[in-house]
Image (cartoon, rainbow, N blue to C red):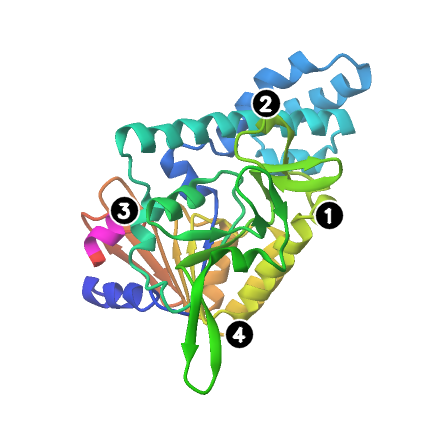
Amino acid sequence: MDIDTIKKIIQGFFQEGTVTIVGSGLSLAEGIPGMRDLAKELQTKIPTLLTDANDINIWNQINDDLIKGIGLEETLHNTKPSTYVEESIRKVTAKYIGDADNYIFMDMISNGRALRFSEYLRRFNIRNRDMIVITTNYDRLIEYACEINDIMVDTLFVGKYLASYKPDQSKYSCCVGMQQRKGKGATLQYAPKITLLKPHGCLSWHLINDIPYSIMNYPMENCLIITPGLNKYREGYSVPFDTHRGRANEEIDRAQQYIIIGYGFGDDHLETHLVRQLRSGKPALILTYELSSNAERLVGECNNITAISHTNNFDSKVTNAEGETILSGINLWDLHEMIKEVF
Protein backbone atom coordinates (compact mmCIF):
# COMPACT_ATOMS: atom_id res chain seq x y z
CA MET A 1 0.00 0.00 0.00
CA ASP A 2 1.18 3.51 -0.75
CA ILE A 3 0.91 6.40 1.71
CA ASP A 4 -2.13 7.94 0.00
CA THR A 5 -4.09 4.68 0.29
CA ILE A 6 -3.14 4.37 3.94
CA LYS A 7 -4.21 7.97 4.64
CA LYS A 8 -7.61 7.34 3.05
CA ILE A 9 -8.05 4.22 5.18
CA ILE A 10 -7.26 6.19 8.33
CA GLN A 11 -9.56 9.07 7.42
CA GLY A 12 -12.43 6.63 6.92
CA PHE A 13 -12.42 5.78 10.62
CA PHE A 14 -12.97 9.36 11.80
CA GLN A 15 -16.77 9.39 11.62
CA GLU A 16 -19.91 8.53 13.57
CA GLY A 17 -20.28 4.90 14.56
CA THR A 18 -16.60 4.53 15.50
CA VAL A 19 -15.88 3.33 19.03
CA THR A 20 -12.43 4.23 20.38
CA ILE A 21 -10.64 1.74 22.62
CA VAL A 22 -7.64 3.07 24.53
CA GLY A 23 -5.00 0.97 26.26
CA SER A 24 -1.94 1.77 28.34
CA GLY A 25 0.18 2.63 25.28
CA LEU A 26 -1.43 6.06 24.94
CA SER A 27 -0.88 6.92 28.60
CA LEU A 28 2.67 5.62 28.41
CA ALA A 29 3.37 8.01 25.53
CA GLU A 30 2.26 10.91 27.77
CA GLY A 31 4.45 9.86 30.71
CA ILE A 32 2.20 7.60 32.78
CA PRO A 33 4.25 4.61 34.02
CA GLY A 34 3.75 1.32 32.21
CA MET A 35 3.84 -2.22 33.58
CA ARG A 36 7.62 -2.47 33.56
CA ASP A 37 8.13 0.69 35.63
CA LEU A 38 5.23 -0.25 37.89
CA ALA A 39 6.85 -3.61 38.60
CA LYS A 40 10.05 -1.82 39.68
CA GLU A 41 8.06 0.50 41.93
CA LEU A 42 6.32 -2.46 43.55
CA GLN A 43 9.65 -4.20 44.10
CA THR A 44 10.87 -1.12 45.95
CA LYS A 45 7.77 -0.27 48.00
CA ILE A 46 5.95 -3.53 48.80
CA PRO A 47 8.68 -5.08 51.03
CA THR A 48 8.53 -2.02 53.31
CA LEU A 49 4.80 -2.60 53.91
CA LEU A 50 4.92 -6.26 54.95
CA THR A 51 5.40 -7.74 58.43
CA ASP A 52 3.41 -10.99 58.32
CA ALA A 53 5.55 -14.05 57.48
CA ASN A 54 2.99 -15.47 55.05
CA ASP A 55 2.67 -12.15 53.21
CA ILE A 56 6.46 -11.86 52.98
CA ASN A 57 6.72 -15.40 51.59
CA ILE A 58 4.04 -14.70 48.96
CA TRP A 59 5.71 -11.46 47.93
CA ASN A 60 9.10 -13.19 47.66
CA GLN A 61 7.57 -15.65 45.18
CA ILE A 62 6.14 -12.76 43.17
CA ASN A 63 9.42 -10.88 43.32
CA ASP A 64 11.38 -13.94 42.14
CA ASP A 65 9.31 -14.00 38.94
CA LEU A 66 9.78 -10.26 38.42
CA ILE A 67 13.55 -10.63 38.84
CA LYS A 68 13.47 -13.33 36.14
CA GLY A 69 11.89 -10.82 33.79
CA ILE A 70 8.40 -12.29 33.81
CA GLY A 71 5.77 -9.60 33.19
CA LEU A 72 3.71 -8.24 36.07
CA GLU A 73 0.39 -9.57 34.76
CA GLU A 74 1.75 -13.09 34.27
CA THR A 75 3.56 -12.97 37.61
CA LEU A 76 0.37 -12.14 39.49
CA HIS A 77 -1.35 -15.02 37.72
CA ASN A 78 1.44 -17.42 38.72
CA THR A 79 1.24 -16.49 42.41
CA LYS A 80 -2.06 -15.33 43.89
CA PRO A 81 -1.42 -12.49 46.37
CA SER A 82 -2.88 -12.61 49.85
CA THR A 83 -5.56 -10.04 50.64
CA TYR A 84 -3.04 -7.74 52.33
CA VAL A 85 -0.42 -8.07 49.57
CA GLU A 86 -3.08 -7.38 46.94
CA GLU A 87 -4.29 -4.33 48.84
CA SER A 88 -0.70 -3.08 49.13
CA ILE A 89 -0.20 -3.56 45.39
CA ARG A 90 -3.36 -1.55 44.72
CA LYS A 91 -2.29 1.33 46.98
CA VAL A 92 1.24 1.54 45.58
CA THR A 93 -0.11 1.36 42.01
CA ALA A 94 -2.66 4.11 42.61
CA LYS A 95 -0.10 6.42 44.25
CA TYR A 96 2.52 5.83 41.55
CA ILE A 97 0.19 6.38 38.61
CA GLY A 98 -1.64 9.16 40.43
CA ASP A 99 1.56 11.17 40.94
CA ALA A 100 2.25 11.02 37.20
CA ASP A 101 -1.37 11.92 36.43
CA ASN A 102 -1.19 14.98 38.69
CA TYR A 103 2.09 16.10 37.12
CA ILE A 104 0.57 15.98 33.63
CA PHE A 105 -2.53 17.83 34.80
CA MET A 106 -0.47 20.65 36.34
CA ASP A 107 1.70 20.79 33.21
CA MET A 108 -1.46 21.32 31.15
CA ILE A 109 -2.71 24.10 33.43
CA SER A 110 0.59 25.86 34.06
CA ASN A 111 2.42 25.36 30.78
CA GLY A 112 -0.32 24.76 28.20
CA ARG A 113 0.73 21.18 27.52
CA ALA A 114 -1.34 19.58 24.73
CA LEU A 115 -2.36 15.94 25.02
CA ARG A 116 -2.40 13.65 22.02
CA PHE A 117 -6.00 12.67 22.71
CA SER A 118 -7.05 16.34 22.55
CA GLU A 119 -5.75 16.50 18.99
CA TYR A 120 -7.50 13.21 18.24
CA LEU A 121 -10.90 14.42 19.47
CA ARG A 122 -10.78 17.52 17.30
CA ARG A 123 -10.90 15.29 14.20
CA PHE A 124 -14.39 14.02 15.06
CA ASN A 125 -17.75 15.72 14.67
CA ILE A 126 -19.32 15.10 18.06
CA ARG A 127 -22.25 17.46 17.51
CA ASN A 128 -24.89 15.04 16.31
CA ARG A 129 -24.45 12.27 18.88
CA ASP A 130 -22.13 11.32 21.69
CA MET A 131 -18.89 9.50 21.03
CA ILE A 132 -17.98 6.30 22.87
CA VAL A 133 -14.51 5.84 24.36
CA ILE A 134 -13.54 2.71 26.32
CA THR A 135 -10.31 2.56 28.29
CA THR A 136 -8.63 0.06 30.59
CA ASN A 137 -6.48 2.88 32.04
CA TYR A 138 -6.90 4.23 35.57
CA ASP A 139 -5.64 7.72 34.83
CA ARG A 140 -7.79 10.70 33.85
CA LEU A 141 -5.97 11.89 30.73
CA ILE A 142 -8.99 11.26 28.51
CA GLU A 143 -11.18 13.32 30.85
CA TYR A 144 -8.62 16.16 30.73
CA ALA A 145 -8.41 15.97 26.94
CA CYS A 146 -12.20 16.22 26.63
CA GLU A 147 -12.65 19.19 28.91
CA ILE A 148 -9.77 21.16 27.39
CA ASN A 149 -11.72 20.80 24.12
CA ASP A 150 -14.96 21.95 25.79
CA ILE A 151 -16.44 18.46 25.44
CA MET A 152 -18.45 17.11 28.37
CA VAL A 153 -17.64 13.68 29.79
CA ASP A 154 -20.22 11.17 30.98
CA THR A 155 -18.55 8.61 33.27
CA LEU A 156 -21.93 7.42 34.68
CA PHE A 157 -21.44 9.61 37.76
CA VAL A 158 -23.44 12.78 38.51
CA GLY A 159 -22.02 15.75 40.42
CA LYS A 160 -18.82 17.76 40.73
CA TYR A 161 -17.29 17.49 44.20
CA LEU A 162 -18.98 14.31 45.46
CA ALA A 163 -20.34 12.74 42.27
CA SER A 164 -22.84 9.93 42.83
CA TYR A 165 -22.91 6.80 40.71
CA LYS A 166 -26.10 7.11 38.65
CA PRO A 167 -25.64 5.24 35.36
CA ASP A 168 -29.28 5.68 34.36
CA GLN A 169 -29.31 9.45 34.95
CA SER A 170 -25.79 10.61 34.10
CA LYS A 171 -26.50 11.40 30.45
CA TYR A 172 -28.98 14.10 31.49
CA SER A 173 -26.21 16.07 33.20
CA CYS A 174 -25.01 16.93 29.68
CA CYS A 175 -28.40 18.40 28.69
CA VAL A 176 -28.14 22.11 27.76
CA GLY A 177 -31.70 22.91 26.68
CA MET A 178 -34.81 21.89 24.81
CA GLN A 179 -35.78 22.31 21.18
CA GLN A 180 -39.41 22.66 20.14
CA ARG A 181 -40.15 20.66 17.00
CA LYS A 182 -43.27 21.51 15.07
CA GLY A 183 -45.90 18.84 15.55
CA LYS A 184 -43.48 16.58 17.45
CA GLY A 185 -43.19 18.21 20.85
CA ALA A 186 -39.95 19.15 22.53
CA THR A 187 -36.66 17.24 22.40
CA LEU A 188 -33.70 17.52 24.74
CA GLN A 189 -30.52 19.14 23.42
CA TYR A 190 -27.17 17.85 24.60
CA ALA A 191 -23.75 19.43 24.61
CA PRO A 192 -21.03 17.61 22.66
CA LYS A 193 -20.05 14.76 24.96
CA ILE A 194 -18.00 11.64 25.35
CA THR A 195 -19.39 8.60 27.10
CA LEU A 196 -16.28 7.25 28.81
CA LEU A 197 -16.35 3.67 30.07
CA LYS A 198 -13.60 2.45 32.40
CA PRO A 199 -14.05 -1.25 33.26
CA HIS A 200 -10.85 -1.33 35.36
CA GLY A 201 -11.73 1.72 37.44
CA CYS A 202 -10.34 5.20 37.90
CA LEU A 203 -8.13 7.21 40.24
CA SER A 204 -11.17 9.36 41.07
CA TRP A 205 -13.48 6.51 42.11
CA HIS A 206 -13.91 5.79 45.82
CA LEU A 207 -16.14 3.70 48.03
CA ILE A 208 -17.60 5.81 50.89
CA ASN A 209 -19.84 3.92 53.32
CA ASP A 210 -20.16 1.18 50.67
CA ILE A 211 -21.40 3.69 48.08
CA PRO A 212 -19.27 4.48 44.97
CA TYR A 213 -18.47 8.13 44.27
CA SER A 214 -16.21 10.02 41.91
CA ILE A 215 -14.11 12.50 43.91
CA MET A 216 -11.30 14.32 42.10
CA ASN A 217 -9.08 15.26 45.06
CA TYR A 218 -9.59 12.39 47.48
CA PRO A 219 -6.46 10.37 48.46
CA MET A 220 -5.81 8.10 45.51
CA GLU A 221 -4.38 5.27 47.59
CA ASN A 222 -7.98 4.31 48.40
CA CYS A 223 -9.36 4.55 44.86
CA LEU A 224 -11.37 1.85 43.10
CA ILE A 225 -9.09 0.21 40.55
CA ILE A 226 -8.65 -3.40 39.46
CA THR A 227 -4.96 -4.30 39.51
CA PRO A 228 -3.43 -7.10 37.40
CA GLY A 229 -3.79 -10.69 38.50
CA LEU A 230 -6.35 -13.40 39.06
CA ASN A 231 -8.58 -11.33 41.33
CA LYS A 232 -9.33 -8.71 38.68
CA TYR A 233 -11.91 -11.06 37.19
CA ARG A 234 -13.67 -11.42 40.54
CA GLU A 235 -13.61 -7.66 41.18
CA GLY A 236 -14.80 -6.91 37.68
CA TYR A 237 -18.24 -8.15 38.70
CA SER A 238 -18.81 -5.62 41.49
CA VAL A 239 -20.21 -2.06 41.32
CA PRO A 240 -19.27 0.16 39.49
CA PHE A 241 -16.97 -2.06 37.44
CA ASP A 242 -19.74 -4.39 36.32
CA THR A 243 -21.86 -1.62 34.78
CA HIS A 244 -18.88 -0.09 32.99
CA ARG A 245 -17.83 -3.49 31.67
CA GLY A 246 -21.37 -4.35 30.58
CA ARG A 247 -21.92 -0.99 28.87
CA ALA A 248 -18.50 -1.23 27.18
CA ASN A 249 -19.37 -4.61 25.71
CA GLU A 250 -22.76 -3.33 24.54
CA GLU A 251 -21.06 -0.44 22.75
CA ILE A 252 -18.48 -2.78 21.22
CA ASP A 253 -21.31 -4.92 19.85
CA ARG A 254 -23.18 -1.85 18.56
CA ALA A 255 -20.21 -0.12 16.91
CA GLN A 256 -19.74 0.07 13.15
CA GLN A 257 -15.95 0.14 13.42
CA TYR A 258 -13.11 0.70 15.89
CA ILE A 259 -9.99 2.75 16.44
CA ILE A 260 -7.80 0.86 18.93
CA ILE A 261 -4.98 2.89 20.47
CA GLY A 262 -2.11 1.40 22.47
CA TYR A 263 -4.10 -1.69 23.46
CA GLY A 264 -2.48 -5.13 23.60
CA PHE A 265 -5.53 -7.44 23.40
CA GLY A 266 -4.81 -9.02 26.75
CA ASP A 267 -7.98 -8.38 28.76
CA ASP A 268 -10.78 -10.92 29.00
CA HIS A 269 -13.24 -8.30 30.27
CA LEU A 270 -13.47 -6.88 26.73
CA GLU A 271 -11.87 -9.51 24.54
CA THR A 272 -14.80 -11.87 24.13
CA HIS A 273 -17.00 -9.21 22.54
CA LEU A 274 -14.29 -7.28 20.69
CA VAL A 275 -12.64 -10.28 19.05
CA ARG A 276 -16.03 -11.70 18.08
CA GLN A 277 -16.97 -8.45 16.33
CA LEU A 278 -13.63 -8.19 14.55
CA ARG A 279 -13.90 -11.76 13.32
CA SER A 280 -17.41 -11.00 12.08
CA GLY A 281 -15.92 -8.42 9.70
CA LYS A 282 -16.17 -5.07 11.45
CA PRO A 283 -13.26 -2.80 10.43
CA ALA A 284 -10.59 -1.72 12.91
CA LEU A 285 -7.60 0.62 12.87
CA ILE A 286 -4.91 -0.30 15.40
CA LEU A 287 -2.34 2.33 16.38
CA THR A 288 0.35 1.07 18.73
CA TYR A 289 4.07 1.24 19.43
CA GLU A 290 4.37 -2.53 19.23
CA LEU A 291 1.87 -5.18 18.18
CA SER A 292 1.38 -7.80 20.88
CA SER A 293 1.40 -11.45 19.86
CA ASN A 294 -2.40 -11.54 20.38
CA ALA A 295 -2.83 -8.51 18.12
CA GLU A 296 -0.53 -9.96 15.44
CA ARG A 297 -2.51 -13.18 15.41
CA LEU A 298 -5.80 -11.31 15.10
CA VAL A 299 -4.54 -9.11 12.25
CA GLY A 300 -3.46 -12.21 10.38
CA GLU A 301 -6.89 -13.81 10.79
CA CYS A 302 -9.04 -10.80 9.82
CA ASN A 303 -9.13 -9.03 6.46
CA ASN A 304 -10.75 -5.95 8.01
CA ILE A 305 -7.93 -4.82 10.34
CA THR A 306 -5.21 -2.30 9.53
CA ALA A 307 -2.47 -2.06 12.17
CA ILE A 308 0.19 0.64 12.29
CA SER A 309 3.16 0.16 14.61
CA HIS A 310 6.70 1.32 15.32
CA THR A 311 9.66 0.00 13.33
CA ASN A 312 12.42 2.38 14.40
CA ASN A 313 12.72 6.07 15.24
CA PHE A 314 12.07 7.05 11.63
CA ASP A 315 9.80 4.40 10.09
CA SER A 316 6.38 2.84 10.64
CA LYS A 317 5.01 -0.58 9.76
CA VAL A 318 1.53 -1.06 8.33
CA THR A 319 0.22 -4.60 8.76
CA ASN A 320 -2.90 -6.32 7.46
CA ALA A 321 -3.89 -9.87 6.55
CA GLU A 322 -2.07 -9.52 3.21
CA GLY A 323 1.30 -8.58 4.68
CA GLU A 324 3.41 -5.60 5.74
CA THR A 325 4.34 -2.20 4.32
CA ILE A 326 7.17 -0.06 5.68
CA LEU A 327 6.65 3.71 5.59
CA SER A 328 9.97 5.53 5.69
CA GLY A 329 10.50 8.75 7.61
CA ILE A 330 7.18 8.88 9.45
CA ASN A 331 5.96 7.78 12.89
CA LEU A 332 2.39 7.17 11.80
CA TRP A 333 1.65 4.98 14.83
CA ASP A 334 1.89 8.00 17.16
CA LEU A 335 -1.37 9.99 17.41
CA HIS A 336 0.38 13.35 17.22
CA GLU A 337 2.39 12.46 14.12
CA MET A 338 -0.51 10.62 12.50
CA ILE A 339 -2.89 13.56 12.84
CA LYS A 340 -0.29 16.01 11.57
CA GLU A 341 0.42 13.83 8.55
CA VAL A 342 -3.11 12.66 7.67
CA PHE A 343 -5.18 15.75 8.40
| Type of amino acid under label 1 | Ser
- Residue 247 visible here: yes
Main secondary structure type of the part rendered in magenta: helix
Task: Name the front one of labels 2 and 1.
Answer: 1
* Among numbered discs 1 and 4, the one appearing first in the sequence: 1
The residue labelled by disc 2 is: 42
Q: Secondary structure at mark 3?
A: helix
| Type of amino acid under label 4 | Ser
Mark carried by residue 238:
1
- Marks 2 and 1, how far apart in space? 25 Å
Q: Residue at x 49, y 38 (%)?
A: 139
Q: Residues within 10 Å of mark 3 (few under 14, many from 20)?
A: some
Q: Residue at x 37, y 36 (%)?
A: 30
Verify CB contact (< 8 Å) between mark 1 and mark 4: no
What span is colored magenta in the figure?
337-341
| Type of amino acid under label 3 | His
- Residue 289 visible here: no
Percent coordinates x, y for residue 237 in the rendering: 73, 50
Question: Would residue 91 appear left or right of 238 to someone viewing this image?
Answer: left
The residue labelled by disc 4 is: 280
* Among numbered discs 3 and 1, the one appearing first in the sequence: 1
Task: Name the front one of labels 1 and 4.
Answer: 1
Q: Within the magenta stretch, is there residue 137? A: no
Percent coordinates x, y for residue 113 in the rendering: 29, 35
Closer-to-camera residue (198/9): 198
| Type of amino acid under label 2 | Leu
Q: Residue furthest toward the bottom?
A: 183
- Marks 3 and 2, how far apart in space? 31 Å
Question: Would residue 261 appear left or right of 205 to someone viewing this image?
Answer: left
